């Protein structure tokens, strides 16, 4: 009886505290997908919306602060490309690459013009992100 109560208590704790710093449920799918390949949970990850000025430059869609491991996503850009689900996934995975795996940018493209890594300095297109989806996440985790 004592064991049963303890187990219930621990399970309850874990559920309440899981991913409390992930602001939008849209961010969860890439995080869960990353965890499957990474083999570890990253439930202390911090992903929030911010205004990064992406509407002007169209290149700062997300940032990762190395010291705090916090990811910020430009809210305007995210809403503007609502229908580009693979590109959105690529953005979150790219920032996870910086924040969790401490990866730097990787240059190079395939013959079809798609980058060889999600860690390309520009977030990969929706088309490329879809075409190389399984390859990209393996490359991200395995390097
Ligand atoms: Zn980057």
Image (tube, grey):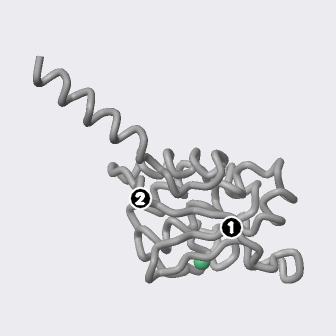
Which mark is on residue 46?
none
Query: How far across and how far down the image is residue 113, in percent?
Result: 72, 68
**Outermost residue toward the top in this view:** 1
Visible in this render: residue 110?
A: yes
Figure check: 1 above or below 99 = above
Please give the name of the residue rendered at 19% of the width and 24% of the height, measured from the top-left corner.
5
- Mark closest to the chain's N terminus, 1 or 2: 2
Q: How many badges with numbers are in the image?
A: 2
Find numbered disc 1 in the image and state the secondary structure of the residue it sits on: strand
Q: Are marks 1 and 2 in contact (CB under 8 Å)?
A: no
At which x and y percent is residue 100? 42, 68
**Beta carbon at label 2 within 8 Å of ligand 1:** no
Quick check: 83 left or right of 122? right
Query: Residue 135: percent from the left, percent from the top?
Result: 53, 54
Q: Quarter-wise, where is residue 80 in the image?
A: bottom right
The residue at which mark 2 appears reads as 44
- At x 56%, y 61%, the residue is 93
Res 73 label:
1
Q: Answer left or right for 97 relative to 79.
A: left
Q: Residues within 10 Å of mark 1 (few under 14, many from 20)?
A: many
Against 92, is 71 above or below?
A: below
Q: Which is in the foreground here, disc 1 or disc 2?
A: 2
Rendered image quadrant of residue 7: top left
**Residue beneath the point at 41% across and 61% down:** 141
Quarter of the picture holding the C terminus: bottom left
Packing grade of label 2 (10 A; few <14, some 14-19, many >=20) is some
State the residue at coordinates (17%, 21%). 4
């Amino acid at each position: 009886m004592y064991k049963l109560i303890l187990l219930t208590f621990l399970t309850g704790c874990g559920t309440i505290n899981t991913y409390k710093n992930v602001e939008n449920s849209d961010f969860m799918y890439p995080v869960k997908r990353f965890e499957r390949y990474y083999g570890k949970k990253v439930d202390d990850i911090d992903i929030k919306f911010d205004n990064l000025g992406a509407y002007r430059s169209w290149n700062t869609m997300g940032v990762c602060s190395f010291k705090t491991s916090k990811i910020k996503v430009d809210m305007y850009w995210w809403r503007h490309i609502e229908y580009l689900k693979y590109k959105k996934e690529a953005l979150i995975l790219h920032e996870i690459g910086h924040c969790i795996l401490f990866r730097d940018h990787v240059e190079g493209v395939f013959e079809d013009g798609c980058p060889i890594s999600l860690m390309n300095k520009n977030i990969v297109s929706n088309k490329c992100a879809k075409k190389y989806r399984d390859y990209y996440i393996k490359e991200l985790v395995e390097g």
